Amino acid sequence: ASQQEGPWFYDPPSDLCALPELTERTLLESLRARFRQEKIYTYIGSILIVINPFQFLPVYNPKYVKLYDNHTLGKLEPHIYAVADVAYHAMLQRKKNQCIVISGESGSGKTQSTNFLIHHLTALSQKGFASGVEQIILGAGPVLEAFGNAKTAHNNNSSRFGKFIQVNYQESGTVRGAYVEKYLLEKSRLVYQEHNER
């Protein structure tokens, strides 16, 4: 430990499975320490935890697309591009469908994570050069969400949609098309309006 922050500085592992003791306290302390270092991505095995920084970090440029292309999960710092890359190359090698689930609370950054994921998947399929394909795939989202967002206690612009995005590829690995299904959440759950919500 060094004297960088306060009385001690903790440099947590990028994969929390490497913690000598895995408890709620050590997990949260590790995530907090990584977040303070602007490391918003952390693995627990093959699961990626993302903490929304509520600001844009410079870790999504073409340099990172190339950096995470065709690498083993865990060899580099955790990143959403790493998860996309592993799924893409597993699909090509095994010739089987792959699935990535993005889940979290309101305001946790699910929509932004989806955008980064689709951007990386389409960039990989275009051999490193992002095309307009991701804009076509994601294009309907903002229009639909203009009619289906809500103000909540945690988020001033909370999406009321669940999304299923299926990206279809040719055998060569290039994107052939996509299917986007949106589910209005209020159709499937009982709701009432909390104080300060709309």
Image (spheres, grey):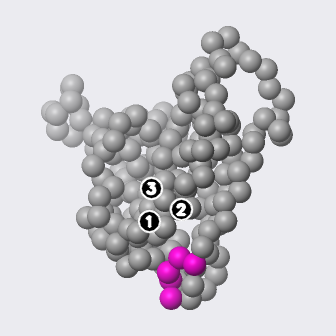
Q: Position of residue 78 (x, y in %)?
A: 38, 57
Q: Which residues are magenta?
A: 172-176
Query: In the rendered structure, does residue 124 fall within the stretch colored magenta?
Result: no
Q: Is residue 157 visible?
A: yes
Comparing 169 with 52, the one in front is 169
Q: Quadrant of the C terminus?
A: top right
Comparing 25 with 31, the one in front is 31
> Which element type, helix, strand or loop, lies under badge 3?
helix
> Which element type, helix, strand or loop, lies under badge 2?
helix
Q: Which residue is mark 3?
A: 116
Q: Is residue 18 visible?
A: no
Determine whether label 2 and label 3 are within 8 Å by CB: no
Q: CA distance from mark 1 to mark 2?
A: 7 Å
Comparing 56 with 137, the one in front is 137
Q: Which residue is mark 1?
A: 132
Q: Position of residue 190 (x, y in %)?
A: 84, 29
Q: Which residue is mark 2?
A: 136
Q: Which residue is found at the position 16% from the left and 34% from the top?
A: 4
Q: Which one is in front in this view, the residue at disc 2 or the one at disc 3?
A: 2
Give the label on residue 110, or none: none
| Neighbour tally class for label 2: few under 14, some 14-19, many 20 plus, Cα within 10 Å | few
